[in-house]
Image (tube, rainbow, N blue to C red):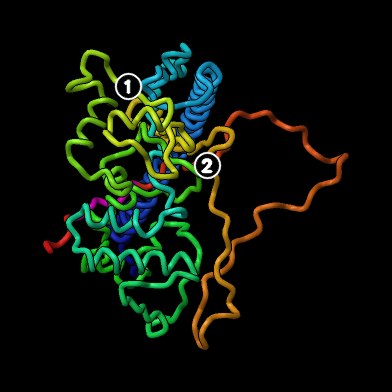
Amino acid sequence: MHRMPPRRGSVLVIVLVTLLFTSAALVLLVEQASTDLLVESRAATARRLRGEAYSALEVTLATLEDFRRAGGALHSPAEGWGDPLTFAGWAPREGCTAEVTFEDESGKIPLARADTATLVNLFKSWEIPQADAERLTDALLGWMHADHVATSGLAPDYDRAELPYNPPGRPLRSFSELAAIDYVRDMFFDEQGRPNDRWRRFTAAFSLFNYQQLNLNAAPPDVLAALGFSDPAQQQRFSDFLTGKGAYSAQGPGWFKSANDATTVLGSAALPAGVGAQIRALRVNVTVREGRAEFHLVAVVAPAGGASIVTTTATSGTSAASGSATAPAAAPTTAPAAAASNRAPSLNYPFTLLEIQENPEIPPVPVAPPSA
């Protein structure tokens, strides 16, 4: 009887192929496990840094409250609270560093209160012709105020847009709305729809929060120009006083305790309405680092009697043109009162939290505007 020879070669091939697939599966498993471990490690690091960031924020607010009580109000970091963590003697846990910087939001003009003269002054200071400055102003005010009457002949036609809509008739809630306003989007955005330098300057001069008086101690040149102080000599004296340079180098950085204090520096006997010298809204930027890991916390706070969020509602949809959409009304800002027995105890917190962001997106890089 004839016997078949053993197929050792075939068995060896099968074993090798099996080992190959097994090895590939193990490599993929290890890679996936490494990725999962890396994600979890980063999440754990973020949680640790988040706690340090909020601790730094609380220490910062406590320091600010100490200065506010001592001086009656906050005016400028030049008062001595520019480095609150060092002043308080606080430091994060070992291996971490914490940094706090400030931006005085109330150094800007509250957009909800901006009038025609203010907007035209600003746009003319950008070397925009008078007629174009008036059209730009009418476009903005027409978007924000349902009863605004255009004086420049501008007649936006939102009904003919690809998706028809009506102006909301209330102040902006986001600067992204500028892209929806006729003529404004042509001036503030490039052909690719990216914000240009005019957009950057506009957002640096106006705030979306509401407060009665802006803080002259943090007013940039564009804000001064919008207020009617467009003379370069005025603006230079103003800057020298606040930074302690030029004729004020001997006294160091200064600040105004009242709006009247600024009349001598500006060389003007009177200041426009809506101008003050106290901080109404302060943006606090906290950055905590551990090795190459970073956590950013941004909070906008207001002292008692300071800024608030704009709560006006949009135009009612019943007045909208046929086939047009209308921006939705604002959601109610107050909840029904709870029963007295269930009411939480009042917290005597010295600041109102207007906005808070964790690891906010980097703002878009401005693009130079087209030449006139």
Count of labels in the image: 2
- Pair 2/1: label in front: 1
Query: Which residue is painted at 65% across and 53% down in the image?
Result: 333
Q: Is residue 334 magenta?
A: no
- Residues drawn in magenta: 362-367
Q: Mark 2, residues whose alpha carbon is within 10 Å: few (<14), some, or many (≥20)?
A: many
Judging from the image, what secondary structure is the residue with disc 2 in? Answer: loop
Q: Position of residue 236 (x, y in %)?
A: 20, 33
Quadrant in which residue 103 is drawn? top left
Camera-side residue of 213 and 62 = 213
Residue under pointer 2: 307
Camera-side residue of 306 and 235 = 235
Counting residues from the start of the chain, the first of labels 2 and 1 encountered is 1
**Residue 48, above or below 122:** above
Quarter holding the N terminus is bottom left
Q: Position of residue 89 (x, y in %)?
A: 46, 11
Query: Which residue is painted at 40% across and 28% down in the image?
Result: 288
- In the displayed structure, does residue 245 sit left or right of residue 219? left
Residue under pointer 1: 254
- In the displayed structure, does residue 228 sit left or right of residue 299? left
Quadrant in which residue 230 is drawn? top left
Q: From mark 2 to mark 1, how far is it between C-alphas?
A: 24 Å
Query: Which residue is painted at 52% across and 42% down in the image?
Result: 307
Q: Is residue 41 visible?
A: no
